Image (tube, grey):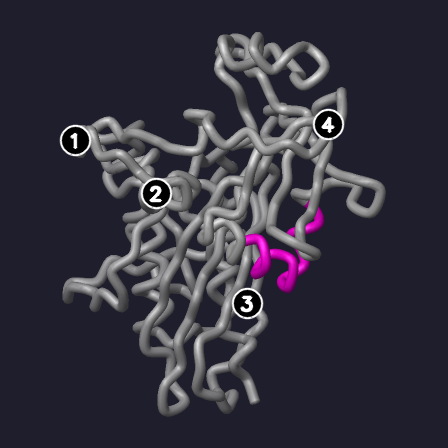
Amino acid sequence: MKKLLYWTLSLIMAASLTACSASTGQPADDASSTPQTTQTATLKDGTYDGYDPQPTYLARALVTIEDGKAVSYEFEEIHLPNYWATYTQEEAQQAGEEEVIAIEGSRGTTWYARHVVIGTGDEAIHLTAQDQPKEAANGSSYLVYGNQDIDDFSEYVADDDHAAWYYEQILAGNYWIEDASGNLKEDLATYSYTRDDGVVLDKAQSRCKTQIMHWTAEGSGIGTEMGANGWSGNLTILGDTLLQLQFPQGEVTKNQENQVVIADTVTTATIEEYQGYVQMFYDAYNKAKA
């Protein structure tokens, strides 16, 4: 797939962005793709979005075009219901067995709420957890939330319009655990997150991986450390490279040093799940084509 070139000149930071994401890993030189873009395309000014849906997260890239050229980017990754709709053991006991699904995993028991709601008024989407978890590509298990119209909400947000709507609701704090009767559970600690450095995040921030700083660079002292760049550092390298090269057409892959290579440009990014992340930047860019 794509690799960033290690430039002797420092890459220009296009935007002050951070994000964090758990990487499951993929062997180097195992897969490659050619981004669907052309350098000669006429671009329409504006800000465009691209998404990378995953079983428990939804990543987004925003690319801004000015005077027919990509000038800045942003990225974020937010939790899906099967990440945030959880109880502590004490809360699960208070909620009652009929409102909880207990899933045993490698790290012990996780108590999931059976019912959640996203959005407000006529736009609200009510979801119910299925009893049987689903297995992700990396072998991990996750709970499926859906309803009579949506089989799996994590697949529902693969549609860009649905993904954009979900981002809007999460960033407005419009998400809740509810019971079978539709009563909101608004006093749960799961809505807020306290980082390792003591920073307390509000309800919306607590769903944003740029704010949580879960996967950070080695030596940061915050969150779970991952490599020299961390998650946000890797995505910044990808975004900076694409901006400098103006989204070149070519193969995206990894070399033997586990570096992401984009159209023959070797980068210092070593993130494992690079395919979807790079593609979401290209998807946003491609929407600007006139």
Disc number at residue 231? 2
Q: Residue at x 64, y 40 (%)?
A: 117
Give yes or no for residue 165 being in the magenta stretch: yes
Q: Gap in Å between the C-alphas at discs 3 and 1?
A: 33 Å
- Callout 4, which amino acid? Ala
- Callout 3, which amino acid? Asp
Disc number at residue 60? none
Please state the extent of the stretch shown in magenta in the rendering. 155-166
Q: Which of these two is toward me, 175 or 28?
A: 175
Q: Gap in Å between the C-alphas at discs 4 and 3?
A: 38 Å
Q: Are marks 4 and 3 in contact (CB under 8 Å)?
A: no
Nearer to us: label 2 or label 4? 4
Q: Residues within 10 Å of mark 3 (few under 14, many from 20)?
A: many
Q: Residues within 10 Å of mark 2 (few under 14, many from 20)?
A: many
Disc number at residue 180? 4
Q: Which of these two is toward me, 146 or 60?
A: 146
Q: Gap in Å between the C-alphas at discs 4 and 1?
A: 45 Å
Mark 2 or 1, nearer chain start: 1
